[in-house]
Amino acid sequence: MSATRIAFYPGSFDPPTNGHLEVVRAAARLVDRLVVGVGIHPGKTPLFTASERLDLLREVFAPIAAEAGAALDCVTFDNLVVDAAEEQGASLLIRGLRDGTDLDYEMQMAGMNATLKPGVQTVFLPASPIARPITATLVRQIAAMGGDVSPFVPPAVLIRLKARFGHAG
């Protein structure tokens, strides 16, 4: 019997974007169980509460994980990413890459994380050309200013953004 492959995919997911969706789609094909971790950072004021983000993640990511044959869990964490990954039993840490700037930063983080928790391996998943420019920060800014974010977020997220701002696409 083989060991269960568990991966931890951390982020703020405020809001979840099509880029996040791509990462989940790819990660779910690699593992038996994918844990999506919503980081809680005191001092930051997110657009959506942790509970709202968890609900959105489950709604949007669960069908994708199921299609790939992976179990999906969505949790919050307020400690180091590698500690949260270890608490979930994950041996893989999933990180999406959009560009060289992401790579430089993520390589530093991967090195630090490997030193802190040698049993947790970082796996980089590259964004498709269409998802590369998408960031949750830009989506929030565009939505807040009345712009159309429908090309950048799943339909369920668009509905929540419209409810929050009274427009957004």
Image: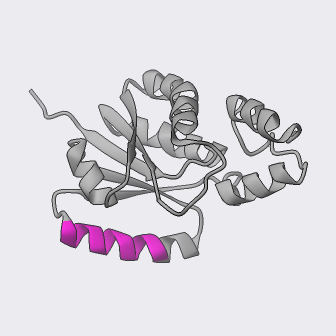
Please state which of residues 25 and 152 is positioned toward the viewer in this rendering: 152
**Does the magenta run of residues contain 107?**
yes
Can residue 110 be seen here?
yes
Q: Which residues are magenta?
A: 105-116
20 lies above or below 159: below
Please state which of residues 49 and 30 is positioned toward the viewer in this rendering: 49
Task: Identify which residue is drawn at 36% across, 37% down.
Answer: 34
Task: Point out residue 95 in the picture as x, y percentages from the top left corner.
Answer: 44, 56
Give the side of residue 15 with respect to residue 93, left or right: right
**Does the magenta run of residues contain 137?**
no
Give the side of residue 147 with respect to residue 28, left or right: right
Task: Point out residue 85 in the picture as x, y percentages from the top left corner.
Answer: 28, 50
Please state which of residues 35 and 66 is positioned toward the viewer in this rendering: 35
Residue occupying the far front of the picture: 43
Task: Point out residue 106 in the picture as x, y percentages from the top left corner.
Answer: 43, 70
Would you say the magenta stretch is mainly helix, strand or loop? helix
Task: Identify which residue is drawn at 85% across, 42% down.
Answer: 168
Q: Quadrant of the C terminus?
A: top right
Task: Report how many numbered discs are placed on residues in the image.
Answer: 0
Task: Identify which residue is drawn at 49% across, 71% down.
Answer: 103
Give the side of residue 42 with respect to residue 53, left or right: left
Task: Point out residue 18 in the picture as x, y percentages from the top left corner.
Answer: 65, 43
163 lies above or below 22: above
Task: Identify which residue is drawn at 69% across, 35% down.
Answer: 157
Q: Can you tell which quarter of the image residue 145 is in?
A: bottom right
Please state which of residues 48 and 72 is positioned toward the viewer in this rendering: 48
Can residue 135 be seen here?
no
Q: Quadrant of the N terminus?
A: top left
